[in-house]
Amino acid sequence: MIDGSSRDNFAKSQEWIKSNREYLLRLLRVITNTCIEHLRRQGDSGCDSLMIFDSWAYLVPEEHFEEIIINPTKEIIASLDNSYITITYPKGIGKKLFVNHFLNYFYLKESKQSYNL
């Protein structure tokens, strides 16, 4: 959205995150709401499992990871109907998965049970 392509490893976006925090949070609000609506429509169309695929999660700087990746993902999952299995895939986060205890659990929407990582 910001760089126009992925050729330069999103250098402009990474710098933009640091200098435009308030605008970023407003943009994330729009993206989060759009994702919620899209996933709800997928469920309404017959999907029994829904996937949140964050293909650029690995590029988010460590100090912004919770605010940019974890919090919106938690909000999306919490907003979905309980009848769907929800799968999250934050591509390439590796160490961040363990450092941040991504979502702190596997969340099974069907049973409302949480499992610690």
Image (tube, helix red, strand yellow):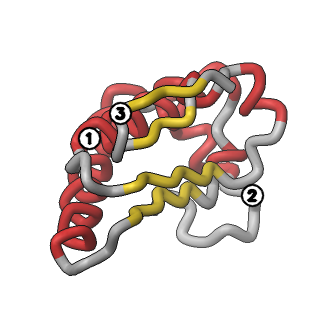
Secondary structure category for the residue under label 1: helix
Q: Is residue 117 above or below residue 29?
A: above
Q: Which residue is mark 1?
A: 29
* Image spot of residue 29 (x, y percent): 26, 40
10 Å crowding of disc 1: few (<14), some (14-19), many (20+): few
Q: Residue at x 64, y 20 (%)?
A: 63
Kindly give the residue lying farthest to the right in the view shown: 95
Tag shown at residue 112: 3
Q: Which residue is mark 2?
A: 9
Of labels 3 and 1, earlier in sequence is 1
Q: How many numbered badges does the structure rendering display?
A: 3
Residue 72: quadrant of the picture: top left
**Residue 28 appears in the rendering:** no
Q: In the image, which is nearer the foreground, mark 3 or mark 1?
A: 3
Q: Residue at x 51, y 54 (%)?
A: 87
Tag shown at residue 99: none
Q: Is residue 74 above or below residue 66?
A: below
Classify residue 74 as left or right of residue 14: left
- Identified by mark 2, the residue type is Asn
